[in-house]
Amino acid sequence: MCGRYTLSAPSDDVAALFDLDGAPLLPERYNIAPTQEAAVVRQVDPEGKRRLDFLRWGLIPVWAKEASIGNKLINARGETVAEKPSFKSSFKKKRCLVPASGFYEWKTEGKGKQPYFIHRKDGKPFAFAGLWSSWKDRESGETIDSFNLITTSPNEVLQPIHDRMPVILAREDFQVWLDPKVEDTERLQALIKPAPPEPFEAYPVSRAVNSPRDDRADLIRPLEG
């Protein structure tokens, strides 16, 4: 699974990657955690432009009775995303791109777990494949837009660390993924695969990242020794 990630790239770089007309000033984030709001790129109107919005991490299906179900739905397995009741509707028409600069994964070592930071060697931002949903609380009338990340088998960088990794899409696949008119399951499923390993590297970092309250630049500093 993917339970933490970062977005520290300049707003202009994010806007350029996703061909946005402009991007709001994005605060540097080094420990984005479930239930928090994070930047998401989506195309709500099939004929409209891409837009960057802030959604809650943890997908709340439209049929959910309570928003808390989203706390358990931060990831969707790529192998079953098209069939799972929690995700099939969003997979069909509400797919999104999640901007990131890197992400964390934990490797079991003895009785503990060591966090690793994975990012592009060139420091450039990239895009996770995600889903989004719009849920309305029947009692309060409040609407919550939420999202999650799709995971797949690991590439050669992640294999020594964990048995899953988030799906990272190539830029040339952004439009197909975002377009609500594209409903060809086979075409979409073909995009759910491990990212090429060559642009990425991983290294161990401090266990301070375990706390979602910590969100600072030194979390991605390589662990000494």
Image: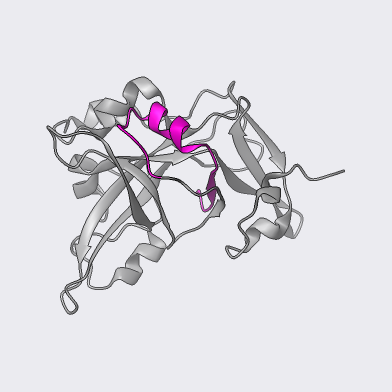
Q: Looking at the picture, tell me which residue is in the foreground, 18 or 154.
A: 18
Give the residue at x 35% y 52%.
54
Q: Looking at the picture, tell me which residue is in the foreground, 144 or 130.
A: 144
Q: Quadrant of residue 155?
A: top right
Left or right: where 59 falls relative to 14: left
Image quadrant containing the C terminus: top right
- Can residue 158 be seen by looking at this rendering? no
Give the residue at x 27% y 73%.
66
Residue 151: percent from left, percent from top: 43, 42
Residue 25: percent from left, percent from top: 43, 45
Q: Quadrant of residue 221?
A: top right
Look at the image and give the residue range highlighted in magenta.
1-24
Left or right: where 217 falls relative to 84: right
**Above or below, comparing residue 220 to residue 137 in the picture:** above
Left or right: where 106 falls relative to 57: right
Q: Looking at the picture, tell me which residue is in the foreground, 37 or 211.
A: 37
Residue 122: percent from left, percent from top: 61, 24
Give the residue at x 15% y 34%.
48
